[in-house]
Amino acid sequence: MCDGEKMAAAMVQMACLYRGMLAVRAAGVRPLIPGLVTNQLRAFSMKKEPELEENPYYSKYEEKIRKLRSSKPQEYKARLEKCSEIKKESVGHSKQADFIKLMEQEKDKGDKAGPGGFTKNKTLDSILNLDMVKDKSGPEIGELWMNYFSTKDTISAVIPGSTYEKMNNRAKLCPTFLYALPRKEGYEFLLGQWAGQELHFTSLINVQTLGENAPSQLILYHYSDLKQDKDIVLMTAEMDSRFMTVHEAQCLANQVQLFYAAQRHETFQLVETFNHRPAEFKHMSVIAELEQSGIGQAVTAK
């Protein structure tokens, strides 16, 4: 089995493992040491094998799940049974395909714009006139980039070339990670998977119900066209506004740099563990790092 298939198997197994789980945070409590979780910061399961409806974020995706259940009841039943089967398997023995790859294949069958309005093969020159900025410095181009997207309902960033190089090298070794999106009642988990210079995010409940066909809800596009000459990498995003806000997308983008560009080896070690030793992975350690960084405060304050 190739590395991509192993990673897909591990990802879906992780989804089944955390099915029905809600991370609960006591207000005002932050761990003092990254990687350690206080008694007030804990995880609990509603039942040993809770029904899908008991997932705390079921209501957010209820319409999509309901449509699958009513229009394709056999497929819906088969997916739930598949999830149960995968939970019993060891990582690497699942036939589950790479959900990103299949999602892109489905998009190829349709128009240029895929599900959720995502753009296929989005290039930098479709956004920025490269000829007009070739004589400008990296900081000048970065300022133009940020000003342009400041009026758009999306996010953007200018990443130093060395920082992106570290992120990209690590992404090749560890292409998948579990992210925690802060909510007022706790955290919602999303899976992020790199596909070249794109980073796709989808909710864990989507993987539970749709498996390898789980659609992206957020895609971060990284453009390294100017990295060699200007020492910058430009980033922007597209999101499914039905399930993702700009503040939530920014929180996830900040987490990508937190974990993939981390100076502390202990922080990136969480990514390594998730990819290569999933049985040892502790999802609450992700929340502890997020709490320590303060990245999620802007989301929960909304």
Image (spheres, rainbow, N blue to C red):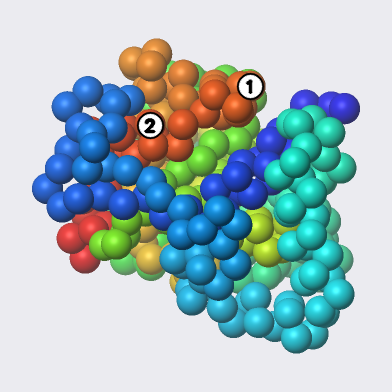
Amino acid on which disc 2 is placed = Ser
Q: Residue visible at 38% across and 16% down?
A: 266
Give SS at disc 1: helix
Q: Residue visible at 54% across and 36% down?
A: 177
| Horizontal side of residue 55 vs 82, given as left or right | left
**Going from the N terminus, do you reach mark 2 or mark 1 first?**
1
Q: Position of residue 53 (x, y in %)?
A: 55, 72
- Residue 158 sits in quarter: top left
Residue at mark 2: 285
Residue at mark 1: 276
Nearer to the camera, 301 or 119? 301
Q: Position of residue 123 (x, y in %)?
A: 62, 49
- Residue 285 sits in quarter: top left
Quarter placement of the C terminus = bottom left
Judge whether 197 appears above or below 215 on screen.
above
Amino acid on which disc 1 is placed = His
Circle 1 residues within 10 Å: few <14, some 14–19, many ≥20: some
Q: Residue visible at 44% across and 21% down?
A: 268
| Horizontal side of residue 288 vs 120, given as left or right | left
Circle 2 residues within 10 Å: few <14, some 14–19, many ≥20: some
Residue 156 visible in the snapshot = no
Q: Residue furthest left?
A: 28
Nearer to the camera, 300 or 55? 55
Give SS at disc 2: helix
Q: Position of residue 146 (x, y in %)?
A: 32, 50
